[in-house]
Amino acid sequence: MRRLWLIFAQTATISLAILFVVSTLKSDLLPWGGHGAIATIREAATGQAGKMSGFSAAAGKATPSVVNIFTSKKAPGNPLTDDPFFRRFFGEPGQNDETRRSVSLGSGVIVSPEGFILTNHHVIASADEIEVALSDGRKSLARIVGSDPESDLAVLKVDFGNLTPVTFGHSENIRVGDVVLAIGNPFGVGETVTMGIVSALGRSHLGINTYENFIQTDAAINPGNSGGALVDASGNLVGINTAIYSQSGGSLGIGFAIPVSLARSVMEQIMAKGVVTRGWIGVEVQDISPELADSFRLSDTRGALIAGVFRGGPASLAGVKPGDILLELDGRHVDDSSSMLNQIAGLEPGKTAALKILRGGREMQVNVTVGKRPKARND
């Protein structure tokens, strides 16, 4: 009896040991193993995912219209390379031309099926060679149709077929809080879409361009995004990404884009004439500070103080004097010096503009024949 009990105990012990090993290492072999369980999984129907994909439709609409721009220019050479003795020992300078070229990158937007591309002036400034890469992988050299440093815009031309031009939106209809997408080539990593909102409108006095009326956005804009598209939630172009405020070189959530209304006006002039023609009346202006408003007994700081008048210029010939305060231009209120510059720039040279000014506490109207803005001068 004792022998039978020992055999039973040993058999039970071995069985339990085998069961422990199997349950630990191969639990799926057991009928109660977790891997053999049947679970009911709910899965979205095909096509339903598109309805939940946020702004993919807007990104898909605009992305084929955004291009990567690569520019290169020859770096300054060492004057010793022209010395015969130097050449004898170190070779001809042409042997190392590739190592003496600096390369930069940016973005651009296809604006017409004929191959016109809108970008920033600073992206292509001083470039010896400009290469454009489309979203489908095609590449081509581009030529400059014209550029405008004062608005930081430029137009390029490529000879491509089957292009997808962007759909122009209306920047005057966007509001603070609207969702926008920034599309470009940040840091050269490739085409990238970031999302944010319109943080502010009409940003000026930033010292970036002569003419400033920026859209501010918190959509991530980084080096390489310059010249790329800022689009609305429908994929329509509302701005050209231009600059960021950053102490690190990366995005801090403060980016600036040129409104499409201004960009389109500049673009159409460049495409038609190769240059941009702006109105000019020949004055220097400054904003009205609270202290100036008190001294002139003004109720607010709206308007622009005429700080100087160019001798022989349109304003001088019309009788405008330093110390006058410009209140209205052709019936439109002047808010500050920046808005005044933009309003005058939009006037057609040769036309007459009505200026409402304040002089000695008395309002008066002066008619000025608008001139053509010369280069490197102030209005």
Image: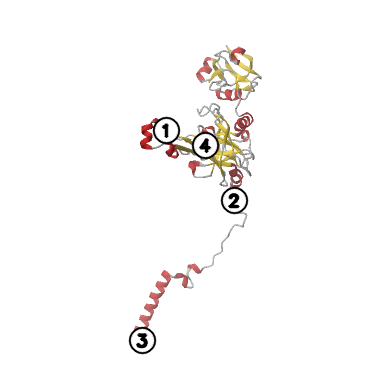
Residue 284: quarter of image: top right
Q: Does 344 sit left or right of 23 as displayed?
A: right
Query: Could you tell me how far apart the alpha carbons at marks 3 and 2 are, in whole angstroms?
Result: 70 Å
Q: Which mark is residue 4?
A: 3
Identify which amino acid the numbered label 2 is placed on: Met
Q: Of the residues under marks 4 and 2, which one precedes in the sequence?
A: 2
Can residue 252 be spotted in the picture?
no
Q: Of the residues under marks 3 and 2, which one precedes in the sequence?
A: 3
Identify which amino acid the numbered label 1 is placed on: Gly
Where does the image place residue 52, in percent across and percent down from the top left? 59, 50
Identify which amino acid the numbered label 3 is placed on: Leu
Instruction: Say if 10 sits above or below 290 in the image.
Output: below
Where does the image place residue 154, in percent across and percent down from the top left? 57, 33
Q: Which mark is residue 129?
A: 4
**Viewer-nearest of discs 4 and 2:** 4
Identify which amino acid the numbered label 4 is placed on: Glu
Q: Which mark is residue 52?
A: 2
